[in-house]
Image (cartoon, rainbow, N blue to C red):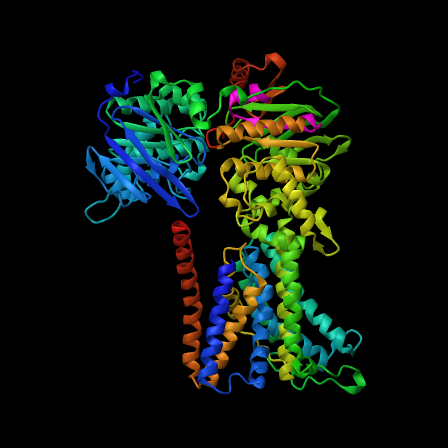
Amino acid sequence: MRSPADIAALPDPMLRAEQIVKQYPGTRALNGVDFNVYPGKVNVLIGENGAGKSTLMKILAGVEQPTSGLLLLRGEVIEAAAPREGLAHGIGIIYQELNLFPNLSVSENIFMAREIVSSFGTVRHKEQDDIARRLMARLEQPIAPRTLVEDLRIGQQQLVEIARALAEEVSILIMDEPTSALSNAEADILLRIIGELTTQGVAIVYISHKLDECLRIGDVFTVLRDGNLIAEAPARDVSLAWIVEKMSGRSTEALFHKQTRQAGDPVLHVENLSLPRAHGGGYRVEDVSFTIRAGEIVGIYGLMGAGRTELLECLFGMQPDARGTIRLGSQAIDTLRLDERIRAGVALIPEDRQLLGLVQNLSVSKNITLASLKRFVKGLALSTGEERREVQRLIEALAIKVSDARQPITTLSGGNQQKVVVAKSLLTRPNVLMMDEPTRGIDVAAKSDIFKIMNGLAEEGLGLLFVSSELKEVVAMADRALVMARGRLVATFEGAAITEQNLADASVSAPAVIHPDEHAA
Amino acid sequence: MMLLQVRAYIALIALVITFALLSPAFLTTGNLIILTKQVAINAILGIGMTFVILSGGIDLSVGSIVGLCGMVAGWLINEGLILPMFGVSVFFHLWIVILLTLVVGVVVGVVNGVLVTRLRVAPFIATLGTLYVARGAALLISDGATFANLVGHESLGNTGFPVLGAGTLLALPYPIWVMVLFAVVAAFVARKTPFGRQVYAVGGNEKAAGLSGVRTGRVKLLTYMISGLCAAMVGLIIASQLVAAHPATGETFELNAIAVVVLGGTSLMGGRGTMGGTIIGAFVIGVLVNGMVLLGVSAFWQIVIKGTVIVLAVVVDQWQQRMQQKALIQA
């Protein structure tokens, strides 16, 4: 599967996109892009956010129509007018966002819109369940076909989505960030399935921000930047440095730069923090104690479900059942409401930017000031002048790319949206800034900016606490790393001891105490 | 958002021109004042409804609040507050009557708000419940009878109630001034205050607003209180205009209010819309009804046309948004 080959040695492309142009209101997402999909190969497509990857995939799958350009399937021009017709051509797609029906069962999801029907027109549930069970077994997930999707973990949901694509006889399978919600073990299962499919001659189109993963499985690499095709190369000509350079036009070293700082007085003190499970006993966060000092960046590493996000939620006042002492400087904040904690000096940048970070109908400016409106009140009304000045200051300080602070937030790229959420948090003048997966789903350049911002804030004396599931990020950024497993704090590393190996080992070393409801949770 | 308002303006101007051409009586001062006085009812209800809808809710109880508050005012003026344990009835000064009536409207709003925010009842269901309860309460007050001749009594010091509906200032009836006052204050609150900003944020993304420290429950509660207050004001105006309070007053007013808000370009999903739009929406309906009456269109056809216009407006919205996107692509 990893046989590196010259482009010349590659088989003829099964699917070829020629000079694809896609024009959206205000932006040209694709600017005359050629793209080849080779049979039996993993065709990796990479590019920063907004480079046009997802748009190109939607065009290949027939979900979107190109403004101009041709699609050639085995040399014949096709017009995939609808997703169903894309499937008729043997092209399947697994989307970045989950496209499941949480209220329906696993097998109903797998067979949505292509139910197995009896001659009376009724659905043959038993047959569907049997196939669903086999598919899930192939993915090493012993999930009953009648389980509701909403009862599954995110990682399992993503595997259901993959099962849905596998249920089709596809010759081309497009995967857009398929591992973003998977644990390492689950991702390995997926990569094994990909290997099986390519040996059967299926062409895989693979999109991922996880570059090491791409390097591991990719046969052919195509790089897009700003809607343009930058390069196509076989695996043996490709390295991490090559990818980063092609993607962003700059070299790797600039990305991570750890700085040494002097940590100051403790700003956040957590003692015996626990969060009981709502049902079935046990804890989601169990007896966690730690301290964060001014000017310190503390990273929390752990696998999915280790309780990292829940820990931040407890600290921010989102979990009313949390028990324990939380002190901000000398002030106890564990009995305060969320808005009072913000005023006391805690800020949280949530993981899910769209769901929890942004108010989509408001402008960039109004999003930034949403958490600090009181400060801008003059008499009865908001002082728009002062609001505009503060917003402008933050836009410049964080280098947020906007043409006008009043433009809709939805017109910004993922990285710039994330900077807006950061700006909103900073405007509340926090002493402690908590960030849950601060670089999730943003491109390399924006990642580097976020890291710079974090370093700058630590310089200014903020205490930073961030959660990440990317080892490299924790190693690169953290002055101190905490490792969580099964709700507990299982290890702390400092300085040179923060290595990928140490973190990964600690995250799985926890005693295997399995709660009765572990499978459902 | 801007475009939607422009669309409503154009519809309004087109209607005015059409009726002016078809009926010489339309563009007379007298008719325009009558028209605006009728518009005031829908506009004031629409203003409260706009707050609720912007925050992502709906208030079906406003029509019943109109009825209930009219009855409360009528009762307090004609019979006073009866205190059986002392065997007396207490009559209040007119201003106190008005204040108490407004408080009743706000209290119904509080009930709606608590049902929605604390007890997590869907707004549609919660306010459907209060729609029935408030209407029932209005009927219970007088056992279904009308309080007539609400002029008060010199000796009780509660005269002057009809002035609210019939009196004028600078040749314009008071209800129009009340509408102007409510509209100006509401537009200011929506655009210029933290509360207004928070209403839009809660309607746009309640979870994100909550994590930004917005007390979403309190914001929603306040929108229902404002809606209750507006409905109570309408109840007072109608009772004053008729110099009587009838328990069935205000039936289906909630649907007029929603229609006015939607015509004004406010999204039923919450988070998008303006007070100005709602006022224009109220005028569109008002001009339409008034013009059709002048032209002698049958009352039954009026209802059909009104419904058609509301749906057409939304269809045009959708169509216009698609055109706008296409225009952007070609630009």
Q: Residue A506, can we see it?
A: yes
Give left or right: position of A511 versus A191: right
Q: In percent of the image, x 66 and y 18: which residue is there?
A: A260
The answer to whether B228 is drawn above or below residue A491 in the figure is below
Give left or right: position of B17 versus A268: left
Residue A346 in the image: state x and y as whole percent: 68, 35
Q: In percent of the image, x 60 and y 56: which residue is there?
A: B115
- Which residue occupies the foreground of this view, B311 or A114? B311
The answer to whether A351 is drawn above or below residue A215 in the figure is below
- Which residue occupies the foreground of this view, A472 or B253? A472
Which residue is at the far top? Answer: A496
Q: Which segment is the magenta one?
A: A459-477
- Which residue occupies the foreground of this view, B303 or A36? A36
Residue B222 in the image: state x and y as whole percent: 65, 58
- Which residue occupies the foreground of this view, A229 or B133? A229
Q: In percent of the image, x 54 and y 42: which residue is there?
A: A402
Q: Residue B254, can we see it?
A: no
Give left or right: position of B174 versus B301: right
Quadrant for residue B160, please give it: bottom right
Q: Is residue A269 magenta?
A: no
Give left or right: position of B236 versus A167: right
The answer to whether A101 is drawn above or below residue B52 in the figure is above
How many numbered markers are drawn? 0
Residue A92 in the image: state x and y as whole percent: 29, 35
Q: Is residue A476 magenta?
A: yes
Quadrant for residue B249, please give it: bottom right
Quadrant for residue A156, please give it: top left
Which residue is at the far front? Answer: B331
Residue A174 in the image: state x and y as whole percent: 33, 32
